[in-house]
Amino acid sequence: MDFKRRQPMGVELVKRNIVTEEDIERALQYQREHPNMKIGDILYELKAANPRTLIEAIGDILGEKGILLDSQTIKVRLTDYMSLDVAKANKAVPFEVDNNKIKVCFANTTNKARMETVRLLLLNKGLVMEKYITFAKDIDNYLQSLGGEVYDDVKKTSGDATVTELVDSIIKTGIKRRASDIHIEPLENEIRVRYRIDGELFTALKIDKEKQAQLIGRLKAISNMHQEKQESQDGRITLYEDYNIRVSSQPNINGEKFVLRLLKKDTDIRNIFELGYPGDEDSVRKSFNKRNSITVIAAPTGEGKTTTLYSIIDYLNRPEINITTIEDPVEIRIDGLNQIEIGAKSTFSGSLRTVLRQDPDIILVGEIRDLETAEIAIQAGQTGHYVLSTIHTIDSIEVINRLRKMEVSNYDIASILATTVSQRLVRRLCPECKRERPLTDSEKQIMTKILNKYGENIDLSNVKTYDPVGCKHCDNTGYYERIGIFEILDFTEEIKELIVQGASTLEIRQKAVELGYRPLIVDGINKVISGITTLDELNKKLLFY
């Protein structure tokens, strides 16, 4: 909670004989170790007073209604009124409905923007919001408990099922729910199962600790891992017809954690524009249809670099072109390509040397990790090939610094780089349940400031945005699948000249903006204006407010 008051909250509570001065001293000491917590939440954590009396007093001091959130208080199903993501983002829980009035408790009643978001969402449903204040811990615990409420099918299996049936149900539910990863994690007193869906982790199930040994044994058996080894291992599950499941195990203090990566076989390659790539056919041809050069996709891990590379390769793939890929591992098999998988005894650089003797036109190198790979990729580009690769870095301009740190010369960087692309994945609003609303004044200010900075003059006065709501189609999350936000830097003669001169990335960025380069945030805001995603989703990735 965040309290705006004339007197400190602690002083007011002591005056009312709710807590003692000694309690406040203890709370202040605790706050020094936990600076993000407020005094009211700390006193609740320290059990300094009766919880109901404490929250009612806090509410009265703030001029609000205080409510203790518990099983007796909550009389409605949260996801009937808002998505779990909206509740988490705004620290809000609806707990009672009477005719057209809905009671909602917040962890913070001074954050007007959050309350306005929830109020408008509920108003669109024909409900008038009545706000209450409660403890942040109780809201967090309740929302955490709902994290897996959409996974009733796997919960039903977990009761009297054999371990074989339980593991099968966990995997099949992950497949059904479009999970990219399944986390099976031993905790101190239980085993937690979580699914990563559209980039977000959701708790689906908690299993009795006594089943841990059997569960680990079954996972190792179907993954072809050594049963007796208590160390990190990699395996593969091939029991599911349409899926190739990679398995990683890692011992921790409570046992062995498993992560299952679900890879669908024969996945259709998505058109690059379906991924959210801005521009048109002409801009794609300008950026990617080249020879004697390198194109690099830059982003942190898990942001869709490989998917974009596959889309580019699919766009360029023709019978008269010899395309070879070097990957770790090969995630999607594409007919007509020569795909090489890096093994335990091979490297990108070693495989790339061999590939150059195979008369390739286009080479895809999964990742440029070191100077040796970079130098061979540059050599390939300089001898008439077109090379596509990825680098782990934050944006398309920082690729230059990353290569410089690998000790690639400024001359080689300028002579060979054709295009660098950076991207992030944001969740796409569910088309079945998203709700339109006007932009708030705060949202308009944030977006206008950014757009004006980069010369994008868009009138936001009549622009609408959308809120996630939650429905059966999206498992009550309000989002369905993800879309990319992109920035593209084409290396013009002016940019290359700056690189050769050893200019800093700040100077290069300034020149690039003058020449039409627009950073990730601009494409992201355009997708918010188009109703594809939300400002909150964008902020999760780019942290701009």
Image (cartoon, grey):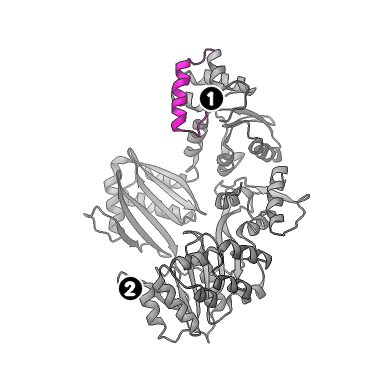
Above or below, comparing residue 189 to residue 24 in the picture: below
Residue 452 colored magenta? no
Find the magenta span and give its range: 16-39
- Quadrant of residue 522 within the rendered picture: bottom right
Reading the chain from its start, which is encountered first: label 2 or label 1? 1
Quadrant (top left/top right/bottom left/bottom right) for the N terminus: top right
Give SS at disc 1.
loop
Q: Position of residue 6 (x, y in %)?
A: 63, 22
> Which residue is found at the position 57% from the left and 22% from the top?
8
Do residues under tags 2 and 1 come within 8 Å of each other at their CB atoms?
A: no
In-front residue for pair 12/423: 12
Q: Is residue 435 visible?
A: no
Residue 30 colored magenta? yes
The residue furthest left is 228
In the image: residue 465, left or right of residue 486: right
Q: Position of residue 388 (x, y in %)?
A: 50, 74
Within 10 Å of the Cα at label 1, are there few (<14), some (14-19), or many (20+) other Cα atoms?
many
Within 10 Å of the Cα at label 2, are there few (<14), some (14-19), or many (20+) other Cα atoms?
few
**Which residue lies under the disc numbered 1?**
68
The residue furthest front is 501
- Quadrant of residue 237 within the rendered picture: bottom left
Above or below, comparing residue 280 to residue 144 in the picture: below
Foreground label between 2 and 1: 2
Q: Position of residue 93 (x, y in %)?
A: 57, 34
> Which residue is found at the position 44% from the left and 87% from the top?
359
**Which residue lies under the disc numbered 2?**
346
What type is the residue that disc 1 sits on? Leu
What type is the residue that disc 2 sits on? Ser
